């Protein structure tokens, strides 16, 4: 892990930051994509969230290339994804 990534991901004690871990665990992984949009709450108290900014920041700090996209019919938050390599997916999964 590069020094820039450590500043983003790790705490002072050297463990993975809990908020980073929670955001990444809410993402959905496919073979070559990470879907970063997710919802929390229930009923009419539902809130949409996006981990896109965090994941882009981590990938850029590590030097991985990525492509942004959205495959939802109306451009909803649930369809936003990052298309990346298999090694980059494994790196992001290791931060859970």
Image (tube, rainbow, N blue to C red):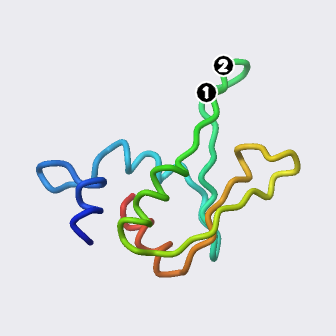
Q: Is residue 60 left or right of residue 46?
A: left
Task: Identify the residue at the far right of this view.
Answer: 73
Q: Residue at x 75, y 56 (%)?
A: 70
List x then y, in percent, for residue 9.
30, 55
**Circle 2 SS class:** helix
**Circle 1 SS class:** loop
Q: Is residue 83 above or below residue 44?
A: below
List x then y, in percent, for residue 2.
25, 71
Q: Residue at x 48, y 57 (%)?
A: 55
Q: CA distance from mark 1 to mark 2?
A: 6 Å
Task: Identify the residue at the far top of this view.
Answer: 44
Q: Is residue 52 above or below residue 19?
A: below
Q: Are marks 1 and 2 in contact (CB under 8 Å)?
A: yes
Image quadrant holding the N terminus, namely bottom left
Of residues 57 and 47, which is closer to you in this image?
Answer: 57
Of residues 65 and 95, which is closer to you in this image?
Answer: 65
Q: Residue at x 49, y 59 (%)?
A: 56
Decide: few, some or many residues near mark 1? Use Cα within 10 Å; few <14, some 14-19, many ≥20.
Answer: few
List x then y, in percent, for residue 67.
63, 69
List x then y, in percent, for residue 95.
36, 61
Q: Point out which mark residue 41 bears.
A: 1
Q: Residue at x 46, y 47 (%)?
A: 23
- Report the residue marked by disc 2: 45
Q: Is residue 53 left or right of residue 39?
A: left
Q: Point out which mark residue 11 bears.
A: none
Q: Is residue 45 above or below residue 72?
A: above
């Amino acid at each position: 892990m590069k020094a820039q990534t450590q500043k983003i991901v790790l705490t002072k004690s050297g463990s993975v930051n809990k908020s980073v871990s929670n955001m990444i665990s809410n993402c959905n992984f496919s073979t070559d994509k990470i879907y970063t949009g997710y919802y929390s709450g229930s009923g009419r108290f539902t809130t949409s969230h996006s981990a896109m900014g965090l994941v882009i920041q981590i990938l850029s700090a590590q030097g991985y290339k990525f492509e942004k996209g959205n495959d939802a019919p109306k451009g909803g938050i649930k369809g936003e994804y990052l298309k990346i390599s298999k090694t980059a997916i494994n790196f992001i999964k290791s931060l859970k």
